[in-house]
Amino acid sequence: MSTPDDDSTLSDTIIDKLAPTTADGTPLVWSSDNEAHLDGLLFEVGKFYKRKGLFQAFFKNHAAVLSNGKLAVDALESAYIMSEKIKDSYSFEKPCPPTAQRVANYDAATLTVGSPLHGKKAVPKNLTEIPAELKATTVLSEHAVEAEDSRLLTSLTHTFGKSISSDELIDAADGSGYKLLELLRARAKSANTKDKALVAAQYARIIRDGVPHGTELKLQSLKDYIKEYKAVKRNVPELSRQTDAAEVDMIDLIAVKDPSVREIYDIKRTATPPTNLDSAVGLLSSILRGRARCEEIDEVNAATASPAKSLGLVANRIAPNQDKALQQLLSTIGTSDGRLSALMSTLQAVADPAKTKAGEDKDKK
């Protein structure tokens, strides 16, 4: 059991939740070995880390949050740069490098005209302690930062460890998630024209075709389409994706193609205009769900209204010695015969012998 002062990272307690997924829990996996898919998948992985609050200190400061709430840094110079309160804009998209490289970048920026750091002092040499204002919240623990880097590699392997190239990439990362991110981004930039064209063509097709032609627009067919659309979209770089407005237009087109929903969709859309894909899908789904429920109600009512089916409801009210006579009578009339309805009325009026104690000796005590 960990103590308040130990240096285990927060990731220790969520190791089973490190596998990147979409917001709806769909695993993010690169299995195609198509390098043009990497940008899109990396974007989705970054959203997962932000949504779950994972590795944020590592991306911003090459640091690790400990279970006691303190921040572990791998060098005193890192703490010094943090104390300067300079926003150097590190993030998942541009992770903070190890401290030696960060210091070099910082010092170079102090000499660069136009840089926010221009004119500031370079990082002092031979630092001996953490700046006073950070002492209460920051500790020097190089191995804790290395462990966080290793955990990042473990997490990334869930997504990028299942393709043909995975072993090569993971071996080259040499235990570092930071290094694997660099390698993945380099591979993404090296994607050839054919790989990119395939991704673009698949995305254009799913947008153009909508719900497959000849498929009735129902709740399930819409769900199937959106699932496929999102799967294709995940492989597309962020800047190449449709805007929210364009995705709403896509759902609008699907709705207006179906005569049975276009009018009610238009009315509801006017009352509550959707702003993104999920809200537009939610609007159309509510209409389709309501229509499905009405169809189910009609089926139930149709079954209840059938005299032939209703016979089963009163069959257990027929005395055993009457069963043979009933079968003979039913064999002489059809289900559309008026006599069947009359028979049903009579049977439903018959009291249940078991409940009336018919046939029992009234004088028996």
Image (spheres, rainbow, N blue to C red):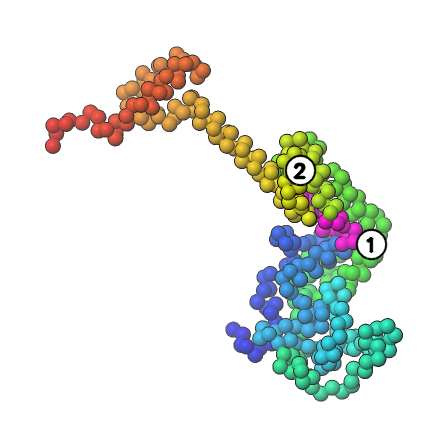
Asked if the stretch drawn in magenta spans residue 30, the answer is no
Crowding near the residue tagged with mark 2, few <14, some 14–19, many ≥20 C-alpha atoms within 10 Å: some
Circle 2 residue: 266
Kindly identify the residue that appears in the image at 77 percent across and 71 percent down. 88
Please provide percent x and percent y for residue 273. 67, 45
Highlighted range, magenta:
225-244
> Which type of secondary structure does the marked residue at label 1 adopt?
loop
Against 124, is 52 above or below?
A: above
Against 61, is 161 above or below?
A: above
> Which type of secondary structure does the marked residue at label 2 adopt?
helix
Task: Decide if residue 185 is in sight here.
Answer: yes
Kindly identify the residue that appears in the image at 35 percent across and 14 percent down. 328
Which label's residue is closer to the chain start, 1 or 2?
A: 1
The residue lying toward the viewer, choosing from 81 and 151, is 81
The residue lying toward the viewer, choosing from 290 and 76, is 290
Kindly identify the residue that appears in the image at 80 percent across and 57 percent down. 188
